[in-house]
Image (tube, helix red, strand yellow):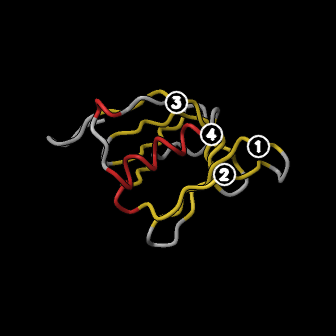
Amino acid sequence: MELSPSEYVVKERIPANLFRSVEAVGGRLTITNERLLFTPHMINIQTESVEINMADIVGVEKRNTMGLVPNGIKITNRYGSEFKFVVYKRAQLIELINQYRVYGMSPDSNRIY
């Protein structure tokens, strides 16, 4: 992953699954101060990465997998696209994403996750 001159990694190698149609694609999330990047494992059928700019995120909310399991988040961008992930410690992850999308926190300010 190539970073822009003003970009830095906040948290990386976060295990996650991204729902694409009927497939839950396994991979890793990387969060920078400017974007969220999902990189699938190579063993998946769908191996295309997803990049979401922090400035484009209009909503981050909790969701339940299969309507029951409280381990999901839904990220909505300003274009109306929704990205549904299964993650561990979702409340902390939501807080971290919101810190950077809303406040543009500096690396010294990051004390969670």
Asked if residue 71 is positioned above or below residue 108 in the image, the reply reads below
The amino acid on which the numbered mark 2 sits, given as a three-letter code, is Lys
The amino acid on which the numbered mark 3 sits, given as a three-letter code, is Ile
- Outermost residue, bottom side: 79
Which quadrant of the view contains residue 82?
bottom right
Tag of residue 70: 1
Question: At 46% across and 65% down in the image, what residue appears?
Answer: 58
Q: Are marks 2 and 1 in contact (CB under 8 Å)?
A: yes
Tag of residue 14: 3
Q: CA distance from mark 2 to mark 1?
A: 8 Å
Element on which disc 4 rests: helix
Question: Badge 3: few (under 14), some or many (20 or more) residues near its Cα, within 10 Å?
Answer: some
The amino acid on which the numbered mark 4 sits, given as a three-letter code, is Arg
Question: At 38% across and 63% down in the image, what residue appears?
Answer: 56
Which quadrant of the view contains residue 89?
top right
Question: Badge 2: few (under 14), some or many (20 or more) residues near its Cα, within 10 Å?
Answer: some
Residue at the disc numbered 4 = 90
Element on which disc 2 rests: strand
Tag of residue 57: none
Residue at the disc numbered 2 = 62
The amino acid on which the numbered mark 1 sits, given as a three-letter code, is Pro
Expressed as whole percent of the image width and height from the top left, the position of residue 67 reads 83, 53
